[in-house]
Image: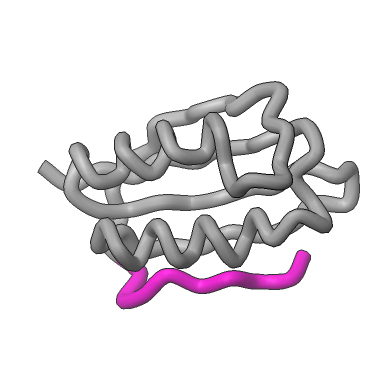
């Protein structure tokens, strides 16, 4: 079953290549969508794909890359749309 999950990750998550590593992890899992920095210092992502793969990516976000210090991952399940063909790293 395909799902869509929105995440907001807070902590020391900007300036530590969080978006790059999230993109690499997403592609390895076959997840599509996007990830971006927010003005308040958080990182936001929209992940679509097979439920197990999306869950694995959300779980990875709870730790993030080596230099990150994740304090919180807010997860919101949304209706699957299927609008993405790839995983994109975007600017705000």
- Residue 85, quarter of the rendered image: bottom left
Percent position of residue 56, x then y: 31, 39
| Residue 48 is a magenta residue | no
Residue 46, above or below 76? below
Tell me the residue at 30%/63% (across/down). Answer: 28
Furthest residue in direction front, as rendered: 66
Report whether 9 appears left or right of 34: right
Residue 59, above or below 38? above
Report whether 23 appears left or right of 65: left
Tell me the residue at 66%/36% (across/down). Answer: 9
Residue 10, above or below 42? above
Pick the residue in front: 92 or 27.
Answer: 27
Question: Dividing the image into 4 quarters, which one contains the N terminus?
Answer: top left
Report whether 72 appears left or right of 49: right
Percent position of residue 47, x then y: 41, 51
- Residue 8, quarter of the rendered image: top right
| Residue 91 is a magenta residue | yes
Q: Which residues are magenta?
A: 83-92
Percent position of residue 23, x then y: 49, 64
- Residue 79, quarter of the rendered image: top left
């Amino acid at each position: 079953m395909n799902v869509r999950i929105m995440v907001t990750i807070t902590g020391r998550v900007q300036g530590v290549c969080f978006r790059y590593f999230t993109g690499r992890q997403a592609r390895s899992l076959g997840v599509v969508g996007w990830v971006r920095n927010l003005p308040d210092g958080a990182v936001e992502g929209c992940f679509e794909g097979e439920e197990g793969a999306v869950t694995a990516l959300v779980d990875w976000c709870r730790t993030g890359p080596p230099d990150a210090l994740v304090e919180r991952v807010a997860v919101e399940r949304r209706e699957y749309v299927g609008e993405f063909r790839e995983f994109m790293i975007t600017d705000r």
